[in-house]
Amino acid sequence: MNPPKPFPILCLLFLAIEEVFKALDPIEIINFSIISKRTKGIAKQMSFFPKYSMGLFINETLDIMFCGTGDMVSWFYAMTSDIKMDGKIEEDESDGCIIRRVFKYSKDPVEEWKQLFKHVREIFKKQTIDVLRITVDSFLGQNVSIIEYLKVNMKSVDLCYLFQTNYINNVDKHTAYLLDNIKIISELTHYLYTENYDFDGKIPKNLQHLCIYNSQWFGFERLLIHDETKEISGGIDIRKIDGKTATFFVHYTGFSMSVH
């Protein structure tokens, strides 16, 4: 049996090429776009890519995630330092959604992941990222470099999830650096083992959802993150164990508290 002949996609008219692209998944689009400058230029001309949401996952591997609007499939392009995983494809199912991961080996996975993300961001026309999930102690020696890179190469992230594999690892400084340099829009979920009561990470303003586990370090003052001021009088004072005073004010809609 003769092998199939290659399909001359570059010889097609642009409208025909666009129809071919609509049948490709994100990984196939990426693989096509890295063939040459010409294929990258063609990929950048496609107009339907905004339908994909994009996530960055930094764990044991460094992944770029894609999820199409209404699709039940998520694609992961995973950069790994394990040469045995090069070219492998894994497929799992969770809650009715299929998860496909394609692995690519690299001697320097962090740097190659950075270059891939920059390339993908151009192709898929993404200035903001939908999901950022970081296991902060996975690449301790390169956290600052990764955070600085993300600060330059994305405007903001909608949902941010912070994890830690080993509570012995102190990730306070790197976590604070991330919170000070990455703009988080809607949700922050913090699973870290923060024990430093002087932790000075900046909690983003105007979040729709804030979830902090292992939150013994998190005092009420950290929730008072808005800069607005208003002169008020009266109230009931309660002395806190740290020496500060909490003043309660009763309103017709409820109550408020000022710590001073």
Image (cartoon, rainbow, N blue to C red):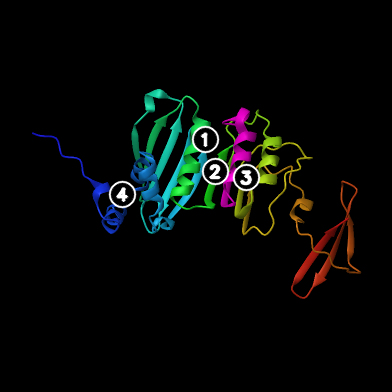
How many other residues sit within 10 Å of disc 2, few (<14), some (14-19) or many (≥20)? some
Of labels 3 and 1, earlier in sequence is 1
Between disc 4 and disc 1, the foreground one is: 4
Contact (CB < 8 A) between labels 4 and 1?
Answer: no
Say the numbered circle drawn on residue 59: 1
Say the numbered circle drawn on residue 24: 4
Asked if 151 appears above or below 251 in the picture, the reply is: above
Q: Position of residue 4 (x, y in %)?
A: 15, 39
> As shown in the figure, which amino acid type bears the numbered disc 1?
Asn
Q: Position of residue 141 (x, y in %)?
A: 62, 27
Magenta highlight on residue 101: no
Spatial separation of the CA atoms under disc 3 and disc 1: 19 Å
> As shown in the figure, which amino acid type bears the numbered disc 3?
Lys
Q: Is residue 117 left or right of residue 68?
A: right
Q: Which residue lies most toward the bottom here?
A: 252
Of labels 2 and 4, earlier in sequence is 4
Q: In terms of secondary structure, where does tag 1 sit?
A: loop
Q: Which residues are magenta?
A: 137-161
Residue behind mark 3: 151
Contact (CB < 8 A) between labels 1 and 2?
Answer: yes
Q: Is residue 218 left or right of residue 239?
A: left
